[in-house]
Image (cartoon, rainbow, N blue to C red):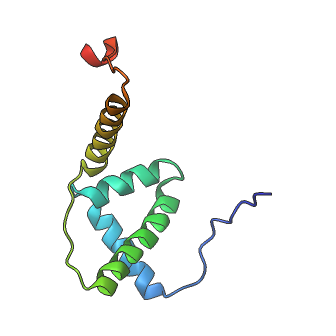
Amino acid sequence: MLVKKTSKTTQGNKALKTMAVECVLATSRQNNRIASHRKRITKRPGKNEGTNRFCSFTINDCLQHLKNRGTHQELGSNYLEEKQLNKELKMIEYLKKKGYTIAPTEQQTA
């Protein structure tokens, strides 16, 4: 039986949360992968809940960079669209190797 998890955030470091919210609001004016991810997240739950969710994403991302001692490499604002397109192209190539013929539909050619 599936149980729905609660979406309430627990009490944490207020200074860290304040800093994370400021960082999230600063990314809203930028054109990068993080800003596009934030826009996609805030569509569903609303502005405040989306900001809180994205704060945890930002903090986890920063922790991973600190843990791996790596530098941040910006992937671009259209990273997810390119990734999806590459996935579709790989699927088409796989099906062609299996012997299927793929023809574009009228929507793709228009």
Question: Residue at 23% across / 52% down in the picture?
Answer: 77
Identify which residue is drawn at 23% across, 57% down: 32
| Vertical side of 38 occupied by 64: above or below | below
Farthest residue, direction right: 1
Q: Residue at x 19, y 68 (%)?
A: 73
In the rendered image, residue 27, in percent from the top left (x then y), is placed at 27, 63
The one nearer the camera, 101 or 78, is 101
Quarter of the figure that contains the C terminus:
top left
- Viewer-proximal residue among 62 and 23: 62
Q: Please name the residue shown 33% across and 65% down the image.
A: 25
**Number of numbered discs overlaid on the protein picture:** 0
The answer to whether residue 28 is seen in the rendering is no
Against 41, residue 89 (above or below) is above
Q: Pinpoint residue 9: horizontal percent, then vertical percent.
A: 59, 74
Of 21 and 77, the residue lying toward us = 77
- Provide residue 50's location: percent of width, then percent of height: 48, 59
